[in-house]
Image (cartoon, grey):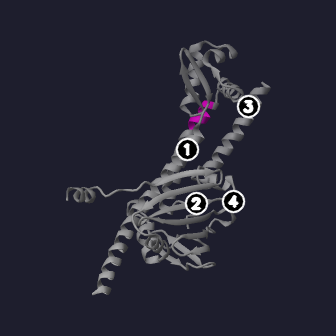
Amino acid sequence: MLGFPLHPPIRVYILNHMVQYTRIRLDASFAALSDATRRGVLEQLGRSDASITDLAEKFHMTLTGIKKHVGVLEAAGLVTTEKVGRVRTCKLGRRRLEEETAWLERYRQLWESRFDELDKVVEQLKRKEKSDGRKKRE
Amino acid sequence: MDARRESEATPMKNRTIVERKSEREIVVTRTFNGPARIVFEAWTKPELFKQWWTPKSMGMFLRSCEMDVRVGGKYRLVFGHDASKPDEFFGRYIEVTPYSRLVWTNDEGGDGGPVTTVTFEEKGGKTLLVMRELYPSKEALDAAGTGAADAMSETFEQLDELLVALGASVGRS
């Protein structure tokens, strides 16, 4: 009964939302992938993380040029970057992990709202037991 | 008196915790301020179950709810505002231990459905409820979960394939 753990209206809502979100993400992904350098950067990062400087050398580009490409990949969620000191390191995106976390959070919200209602049922039954108990004693 | 007023104004709300325990399992934990027999009753009597399973805040509509809570007994929940397009959830109870344990299958999705185990543990008048959903495989859980949308994981598989194909073509060029 929890099988597909979300109930239909929620499921439809999330599905629509996710499909729409996916579509936007995919548009961004396809745009990002339309360029040979950017595909090369992804392939490179698939082998190992690299700094902007590494990438610029590898692809014979200026720092500004490679930063632009990395920026597009980052916007599409395909790459993440982190600056430590003066070095900006690029790695493949963690998009899936974030989506899993988001799903768990929605799942938690569903159960939280169910259980808030269940609290009320429990209170109601406790009151009933109490008053039934009183009646029996009377 | 102040203390009582305070407890009425801000009733203690118990936390709902959700964890992905393993590749195949999701666990939800929550404490209820009542004895296990009451909480168990709310899970096993349709007229009570209906009161909380579809929270009003979620805009859900439960058309019908049948539960034959005994080992081998079936349940069937029908959702949906539109009677011509009902959404059904059904399965069988495979373990029923009054006030402490319920296990059921989720068969609406075919073989890939999880087995749900709910345990009720009473301590000092409160009940700790633990609900586990164990899927037959990581893929089944991913499809129900991260996929939120089978469509979604499918889309990503396509993207993966595309990336592999693009990677290969980059390698060649």
- Determine crowd level at label 4: few under 14, some 14-19, many 20+ residues with C-alpha closer than 10 A: some
Q: Nearer the viewer, residue A88 or B171?
A: A88
Q: Which amino acid type is shown beneath numbered disc 1?
A: Glu
Say what amino acid the circle numbered 2 marks.
Answer: Arg
- As helix, strand or loop, the secondary structure at mark 3 comes to helix
Mark 3 — residue? B167
Give the main secondary structure of the magenta stretch.
Answer: helix
- Share a chain, discs 1 and 4? no
The residue carrying mark 2 is B132
Instruction: Report the amino acid beneath label 4.
Output: Pro
At 56% from the left and 56% from the top, the residue drawn is: B27
Query: Total label count?
Result: 4
- Quadrant in which the N terminus of chain B is drawn: bottom left
- Specify the segment rendered in magenta: A26-32
Which residue sits furthest left? B1
Give the residue pinned by disc 1. A99
The dot on residue B136 is: 4
Residue drawn where x is 56% and y is 14% of the image: A64
Left or right side of B96 for B158: right
Circles 1 and 3 on the same chain: no
The subunit letter for the residue under badge 2 reads B
- Do the dots labelled 4 and 2 sit on one chain? yes
